Amino acid sequence: DTMWNLGTWMWQAALCCMLLQTVLPSARGLNMCMSGSATSCEECLLIHPSCAWCAQEDFGRGRSLTSRCDFSQNLLKRGCDEHFIEYLTSSINVLQNIPLSSKGSGSTQYDVVQIMPQKISLSLRPGDQTWFSLQVRQVEDYPVDLYYLMDLSLSMKDDLDTIRNLGTKLAHEMGKLTSNFRLGFGSFVDKNMSPFSYMAPKYQENPCNGYKLFPNCVPSFGFRHILSLTDKVDRFNEEVQKQMVSRNRDAPEGGFDAILQAAVCKEKIGWRKEAYHLLVFATDDVPHLALDGRLGGLVHPHDGQCHLNDNNEYSASTKMDYPSLALLGEKLAENNIFLIFAVTKRLYVIYKDFTALIPGTTVEILDQDSKNVIQLIIAAYNNIRSKVELSVWDHPEDLSLSFTATCQDGNPLPGLRKCADLKIGDTVSFNVSVEARSCPPRGTDHRFTIKPVGFKDRLEVAVDYECDCGCSRNAQNNSIICSSIGTYNCGTCQCEPGYLGARCECQEGETSNMFLSACRESEGKQICSGRGECSCNQCLCYESEFGKIYGSFCECDDFSCARHKGILCSGHGECHCGECKCHAGYIGDNCNCSTETSGCISDDGQMCSGRGSCVCGRCQCTEPGAFGETCEKCPTCPDACGTKRECIECRLFNSGRLADNETCQRQCKDHIITVETLKTDEPGAVLCLYKTDDDCVMKFTYSEHASGQSILSALKEPECVRGPDALMVLLAVVGSILLVGLLLLAAWKLVITIHDRREFARFQSARSRARYEMASNPLYKHPISTHFVETDFSMYGKSYNGGLH
């Protein structure tokens, strides 16, 4: 609430500044109140919301009639009593303001409130901008009605086989989102008439007669309601299992006939007032549109009514044309139905264009055999619940409405009437500026309604116009003050035809030099600016085929303003004395610049994708290389790979930031192609790569197709290079050390062996030489051994220790 109050205060401050800027220039320069052509109080108040009128009888004598019309502060300074000043202001009265609910199911199911307030009344002075605020909340556990509308032409046979047990699985998944879920089923093919279906006698009972691939099928039909909305999901399975496909002649199908009947036949389908209405439209081909029926002689346009007979079949299929997109959008909005196009990939762009023309519509890509239908429905439901968009019903032509959204970040977004990326239970607020451009005929009662798209809740607004001055209630016919030939009203005389003057004292045609000087704006200028005649001290302005000439000196007109494409003030403003007074929501010299910014919001919720600025309701891309309606396309931008990476992660691997908040399907509409080998030499393609959480490298290319669609070509799987095994590294290191050691040891052994062998060879050589010398040297003598012998001669009385022998 604090954030919302801050946003409201900022918006109020901006509005006050805007109003001051509107009033102050007029006060400093041209006084538009006095320069206008107002001859009555009502005319004065229409000139500008800051103008006031003095109804005092003796005020302004000797001055022109328009001098009674001025700013209120000027009138006070000039002697007008405050009691006689007529100054109307706009006001707002809240009639019903029930607090918002927090839960959708349970005992309060039938009293759920998702918008606040519910009823207000406005009292508007033309040209005076006023504003009111409203809050919207997506309550938790809100009931859901889902009607599955399936194309049963022959090409959908494999899809029919897939969904035969859809009811149980879908109810289980939806049970996680709501405790009150109901499911229904219907089917369609096409109009059973030429040239849309086979009409030859042999095809009447079996259009597949002679068709080898599938020889048996049921006759063609427009739309058949099979199962009303029910919480008994087993019945859904039973009814689907009974169905058989049919066969039509041309490629387009009659699906739009079926959508309209499913929307308007509320009682037979069983739509509940207090529930979200989801209509899932599953097909694999394009639809027939309005005027296609003329090929079969159907000239009556669709009347938008329910035409289901007792057999629950569309009885007007061969009597009326296909509905138009406008009629389809109107009926879906009237009955608060969210339409979900579940189509194959090749049809995505076509149905995406339809969503821009039908409010409250989304498109999802359906697999060829509908295997992803449950995920598709869940994603679409989450997408629908993640945004709030306001729509206006019965908008009066003379009212200008301008919206300012304050979403979850608390920042006011002027010109925006929707918020996205919301969570269930979030509350958002909108400030609505209202301006009445003119006064309708007296007694006109205007009402309009503001409602979030797809909601049953609404804000009803009653409008009353402040166009009559209070002093007009005291008007005096044939008053003496007006020479008995005029009506005295709000201080002035409204003379009978042929009479002029402040008191109706002159007749037309009376002229004198004294009167002529009063008819010149300044000395030297033409009398009545050359666009009127001076009569009785007043300028009577000429009539012009281009518009109205007015002013005290006929100096103003309502046709000499700037134009855009030949249209005065672009059709979005009023011409006043040479200047365009723009309606709410438009600015500029010729009012051709819209302040609406909703067209500048990209799918990711940013203004112009963060690559440009919103000027006059359109994005002007400032980032070099950026283009597209919201500057969303930019292959050469520095952040291009980063933004597309998130789409690759969520679309191919269901991971990343977008997968968590369930916005992948909404934000990532690019066409993704998976390949085994990536081609990087394609012209205009940008190569992107990033590292995954598994330390793998994912590669893809980003390019823009001539059709305007972004193309992402990605590898089926990231390129992964396995890191070294620690044990293997250890074993390798140890083994390397051992190997090196063995090699060194072997080398050392080899060196030692070689060295020993050399030494042994040297020894052998020396030994051989020694033998030769012993055999042939004449100087050589054999050695003589000498031995010492110890002899004991003690017996002889002498002792000898030895001697030589």
Image: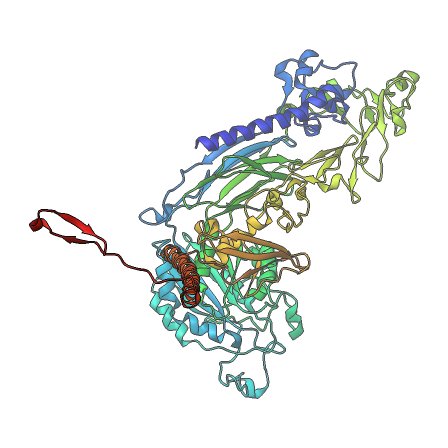
Q: Which quadrant would the C terminus be assigned to in this image?
A: bottom left
Quarter placement of the N terminus: top left
For the residue pair 766 and 393, the one nearer the viewer reads as 766
Measured from the top left, where is residue 446 in percent x and y? 58, 41
629 left or right of 560 in image: left
Residue at 61%, 16% (x, y): give it: 83
Along the line of sight, which residue is nearer the eye, 788 or 618?
788
Image position of 510 with respect to 718: above or below: above
Q: Locate residue 300: give its quadrant.
A: bottom right
Is any atom of residue 559 visible in this view? yes
Q: Quadrant of residue 468?
A: top right
Q: Is residue 464 above or below residue 231?
A: above
How many labels sit on residues?
Answer: 0
Q: Is residue 766 left or right of residue 700?
A: left
23 up-or-down from 665: above or below: above
Depth check: give the residue in front, 32 or 582. 582
Q: Position of residue 76 (x, y in %)?
A: 66, 13
Q: What is the quadrant of residue 706 in the picture? A: bottom right
Q: How is the image coloured?
A: rainbow
The residue drawn where x is 65% and y is 25% is 472
Q: Residue 296 appears at what percent x and percent y?
A: 64, 75
Residue drawn at x 63%, y 43% is: 611
Q: Is residue 334 visible?
A: no
Frontmost residue, 107 versus 136 = 136
Position of 407 compared to 81: left or right?
A: left
**Which residue is outermost to the left?**
795
| Coordinates of residue 721 in the picture (x, y in percent) | 47, 58
Question: Is 248 situated left or right of 805 in this image?
Answer: right
